[in-house]
Amino acid sequence: MGTQEPAGKSQPGFRRIFAVIATGEGISAVDLVLYSMLIFVPIAFIVGFAGLGGIWEFLTSALAIVPMAKLLGTATEELSARVGSGLGGLLNATFGNATELIIAFFALQAGLTTVVKASITGSIIGNLLFVLGLAIVAGGARREKQTFNATAASASSSQMTVAIAALIIPAVFVAASATTSHSETTLEGISVAVAVILLLTYFAQLLFSLRTHSHLYQEEALEEVGGNVWPIRKSLIVLAICAIIIGFLSEFLVQGVEYLTSTLGWNELFVGVILVAIVGNAAEHMSAVTVALKDRMNLSMSIALGSSTQIALFVAPLLVFVGYFMGGSSQLTLLFHPVEIVGIVLAVLIVDIVSRDGESNWLEGVQLLAVYAILAVAFFVLE
């Protein structure tokens, strides 16, 4: 086990951001680069509102979301020191997925249902393989091993198995009906029914993690550490401000996605699974890796696995209802591409194997990243 930084070590707030960038004192080189990227926030707004469009709108909005996600992650880490790692991980995943929801909403309005489905897939496999893989490599680079609560990780893996069933059934229905006639209305009805079940399962998970088995998600050692931790009110205000700004940036991002897919002819699956998912889940990327470096693997696992289950059990079914009420080309079903389903199954399988013993090392992180890279290549060449 490595040396753990005090949970009470306060991170820079908004008033210190420019001083931090100017002096570089009391901050890591990585954080200094991230905070310096805040310059892209006004640039993205200028490009977006000026209607410049094209690849520049996608790039500037994507780059602007990254430092805002860092600030969001910092506020969540401070909040977790007050309320515990279980609720802290839940809040982080929720605010990260708020960005995903906003991106998906504007994409649905534009009729980009394939991109929306791909971003759901990308968020799930991205958090399970890319985010968790990076966190394990970063945290285990200077340690022989890191430990976490295997029971809590197993519960998340079981929830993802439920999500896999929800994705497979509509595909099986279409395959079984290949020789007979089935209406789009029937598929939509199945998707809505499955969405309801997923939401009920998600609320059951909330009851499990926050009430009946909350002790599985706590890091008792951290709760004994005092220090200059942000007040809860300050953390919540920073979270809210970041979420609002990211919301505007997400609208610009979607407009850039339309340019990539319609004008440049990029594969919608690759754009959604890889590009949009990475940007939309930047908060989880930053936070999970940061806390893993501090040897807080319970919180890191809670962020990565919690975000995946929220995407599968909350965001996906919620988007089904949003698309249903929007109607027309915005209608979203749970019928996913076979490669997407295979990717999610593989991701859940390998994460379950890695997390089963409650220990991790850097090689297991490399293995997760390797599977993610293989899937990325497959989506890139897929036609």
Image (tube, grey):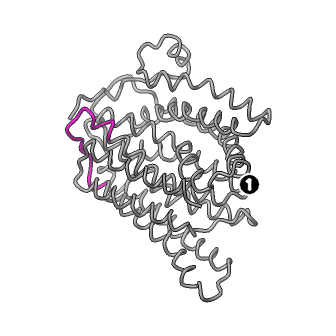
Vertical relation: 5 (above or below) 55: above
Question: Which residue is farthest top?
Answer: 23
Give me the residue at 52% from left, 30% from top: 71
Quarter of the figure with residue 267: bottom right
Name the residue tied to disc 1. Answer: 110
Task: Give how far across and how far down residue 7 sits, in percent.
Answer: 34, 29
- Residue closest to the eye, 60 or 245: 60
Residue 8 vs residue 105: left or right? left
Q: Is residue 144 magenta?
A: yes
Say if 24 sits above or below 140 in the image: above
Queried whether the magenta region covers residue 327, the answer comes back as no
Above or below 99: residue 201: below
* Residue 245 percent location from the top left of the image: 64, 35
Q: x, y (%) of residue 278? A: 52, 44
Question: Is residue 161 placed above or below 135 in the rendered structure?
Answer: below
Nearest the viewer among 314 and 259 is 259
Picture residue at 33% right of the left edge, 33% below the top: 293
Q: Which residues are magenta?
A: 137-152
- Three-letter amino acid code at the position of disc 1: Ala
Task: Say what secondary structure mark 1 lies in.
Answer: loop
Give the quadrant of the N terminus: top left
Position of 133 compared to 182: left or right?
left
Q: Quadrant of residue 337?
A: bottom right
* View extreme (bottom): residue: 180
**Does residue 148 appear left or right of residue 64 in this picture?**
left
Nearest the viewer among 261 and 247 is: 261
Residue at figure coordinates x 59%, y 84% from the top left: 178
Relative to residue 256, is residue 272 drawn left or right? left
